[in-house]
Amino acid sequence: MTTRLTPLLRAWEWQTEAACRGMDSSVFFSPPGERGKARRRREHRAQEICRRCPVRVPCGSFAVASDQRYGVWGGHTEADRRTTTAAPAADRV
Ligand code: SF4
């Protein structure tokens, strides 16, 4: 049992150091239909938190690897991730 759980725990252990730990998910996830200034304001506030987060890189990588479609992860918005994952591999850094 421990053997099977260990990889799963490793996949999530970066979250223990997350700057957003304990925060309401509404800080990072827009409600359905939110657009324009309200959406940009929410995303900018989330990105400010992510900017000082020590696990920003693994968080962003996890979001791309697990195809997270919604919310701000690793300082990247939904639109940022769509652009990144749509680019040919040679364009990614
Ligand atoms: S990078 Fe942002 S969303 Fe990811 S763990 Fe840190 S604060 Fe949370």
Image (cartoon, rainbow, N blue to C red):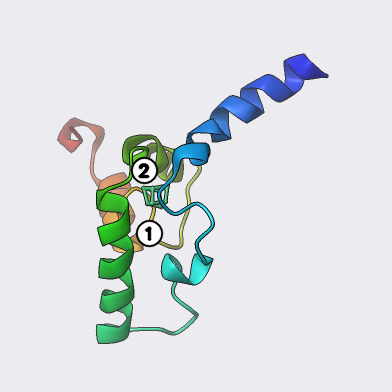
Left or right: 60 with respect to 44? right
Note whether residue 26 is visible: yes
Q: Is mark 1 within 8 Å of ligand 1?
A: yes
Q: Are marks 2 and 1 in contact (CB under 8 Å)?
A: no
Q: Quadrant of residue 53?
A: top left
Q: CA distance from mark 2 to mark 1?
A: 9 Å
The image shows residue 11 at horizontal and vertical percentages of 55, 30
The residue located at (27%, 56%) in the rendering is 80
The residue located at (43%, 69%) in the rendering is 27
Q: Which mark is residue 72?
A: 1
Q: Amino acid at mark 2?
A: Gly
Decide which of 72, 45 is in the foreground and name it: 45
Q: Amino acid at mark 1?
A: Val
The residue located at (26%, 54%) in the rendering is 83
Q: Is residue 48 above or below residue 6?
A: below
Q: Is residue 28 above or below residue 90?
A: below
* Quarter in which the C terminus is drawn: top left
The image shows residue 19 at horizontal and vertical percentages of 40, 49
Q: Is mark 2 within 8 Å of ligand 1?
A: yes
The residue pinned by badge 2 equals: 60
Could you say whether the residue bearing mark 1 is in a helix, strand or loop? loop
Q: Give whichever of discs 2 and 1 has the lower sequence position.
A: 2
**Neighbours of disc 1 within 10 Å: few (<14), some (14-19), many (20+):** many
Q: Is residue 42 above or below residue 34?
A: above
**Neighbours of disc 2 within 10 Å: few (<14), some (14-19), many (20+):** some
* Quarter in which the N terminus is drawn: top right
